[in-house]
Amino acid sequence: MYPSRMGPSAPSAGGDARAGGPRLTARVALYAALALLAALAATFLVARREATAHAEQSVRAHTRFVADAILRDHLRASDFAAAATGARRAQLDRLAHSELLADGALRANLYAPDGRVRYSTDHALIGSRPDEPDTVLDALHGRSVGDVTDLGAEDGVRGGRKVLESYVPVTLPGARRPAGVFELYEDYAPIAATARETFVPIALVLALALALLYVSLFPLLRRVATRVRRQMEQIEHQAFHDALTALPNRALFHDRVEQALRGARRERGCVAVMVMDLDRFKEVNDTLGHESGDRLLVEVGRNLRSPLRAADTVARLGGDEFGVLAPGLTGPEDALALAERVRAALQRPQRIAGLEVDVDASIGIALYPRDGEDVETLLRRADIAMYVSKETHAPALYAPEQDQYSSERLSLIAQLRRAIAQREITVYYQPQADLRSGRVRSVEALVRWEHPELGLLSPDRFVPLAEHTGLIRALTSHVLDVALEQCARWRERGIELGVAVNITGRDLLDLRLPDEVAELLARWGVEPSMLELEITENTVLTDPIRARQVLVRLSELGVRLAIDDFGSGNSSLGYLKRLPVDVLKIDKSFVLGMQESEDDAVIVRSTIDLGHNLGLRVVAEGVETDATRGALQQLGCDVAQGYWLSRPVPPEDVERLLDGTASAASAGAV
């Protein structure tokens, strides 16, 4: 068992499941026994009820037989017309004692159709009317009527001898309708005894059968319990582990961080939460296929375990993103040292699909209690630090000034997504003038946001948000589309103006960018040479191989490429020479200070010479005074851009600026 997978705070699913195996089997056996007992009890009740009902039905059949076979021939219509008295009652008494009151019969009654008792072996009932006359009416209409009651119920006496009373109609010879109703009271004890004699053997047989069934099913129950236990283990493992790498997933990682924080609160300790993202993983996926990408993730998961302590946890949070939990650290230096060991473990070359692949990671670190006191805050701030790590190429600790996600910014992100989708983002244009002729031959497209509440927002308010949230590709596509459409409209008016558009690191590393640019050029009918794409030095250095691949394809389209803000980054001149760039743009910080700082002036002059030696056109940004323009012209700079010429303006203002600006520039040309 790997320590990083099953730390002290991990749910011990496997151990608990194994210990619970006998308990689970016992529970299944108990539940099965209870189910069988319930079935047995229900069967007993049904069998007893059926046996009793059968016995009662036999008694009712006997009553009907007496009425049809005996009373029919011995009774008269007058017996139901008036109460039996005198000699007739004596005759009926003899008939009752000789023919009716036998085999458990205790009392006999004859009812007139109106419900009155015309004769009863209990003479006290003659002439009375029963409490429930409806039973007589039901019997007259041929419905089977019977009930279990007490012998003295008619007199209001309860708790006497238990009897079964049955009512049947009596039809005299030659009559079509019943003349009255015959009621017979049978002792219930023999009926119950008969039911028991029928029920007990059935019950014993059923009990024995169910007992044998239970015994025969016990091995099956044991197998079922074992299978259920294994399935429970599997389901629990799948719920808390990544299927590809077998590492804990985000849910289990979240739980372990929560447990570590509880321990740290008690002990006043320090906990580090790290979020790491693999660099160039998308390139592996795109180049070698997703299967190779999956194999790389598996290898990364294995390598991540080696530098960690037994108490640490590594998890796959999703995609190529991993998390590390390190409790019990002494402070930031300890966390950075652990992150460096993790990064070093990942940098071991991996062979994937027959190729040796270098792996690196950007690692962001957040510490409890310094950077947050709950899981979500620590994860979010570690994620923010990870983006800093992407820029510095070293593990980064969270710092408040890095946090781009205040509530205001989060609201702005949601609004930005909607603004891009609904094309509410506008583009301003800043002219670029040829320093020799003074003519404006191109403009730089600069994005602006006409916010309905905050007014006109400059790029620095929302472009970083777009870069951090993945919206930058959609934003760049929108600016390219708008700028090329405007370029086509100017050409229709006879104005030949090229347009320069800035692209970011995420844009440059997207292999689909050249195809997108080609599609937009074709849509608006713009010559590729009229489009210039500007990139920064640091953008290229993020992933030089991939960046060069994209730049070569763009250059083959005929698009001009420019290095923007040159001098402010860390580019290698040797690598710069191998890039298919056409333009070098001097960072405006040097141009703005060249009149006051000799160092800045030297940098500007050296950059112009370097660009020309490499065969590149050189553009100076930040030209705000005529003196600066003149100095650049003397140094041989090709193009000037800045407030001296014009601020960024909407497209409708560009045409009005062209003539006057060109004349002024021409007048100052040497």
Image (cartoon, helix red, strand yellow):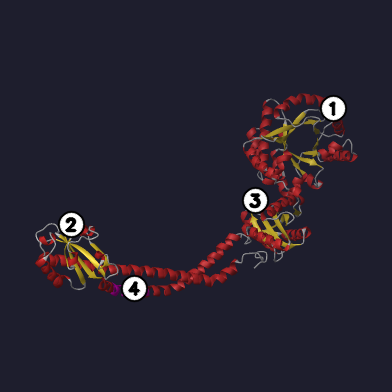
Q: Are marks 2 and 1 in contact (CB under 8 Å)?
A: no
**Magenta region, residue range:** 195-207
Looking at this view, name the residue that lies furthest to the right: 598
Q: Main secondary structure of the magenta part?
A: helix
Give the CA separation, mark 1 to mark 3: 51 Å
Residue type beneath disc 1: Ala
Q: Count numbered badges in the picture.
A: 4
| Nearer mark to the viewer, of 4 and 3 | 4
Give the CA separation, mark 4 to mark 1: 120 Å
Q: Nearer the viewer, residue 641 or 646?
A: 646
Residue under pointer 3? 286
Residue under pointer 1? 669
| Nearer mark to the viewer, of 2 and 1 | 2
Verify whether residue 307 appears in magenta.
no
Residue type beneath disc 2: Asp
Verify whether residue 205 appears in magenta.
yes
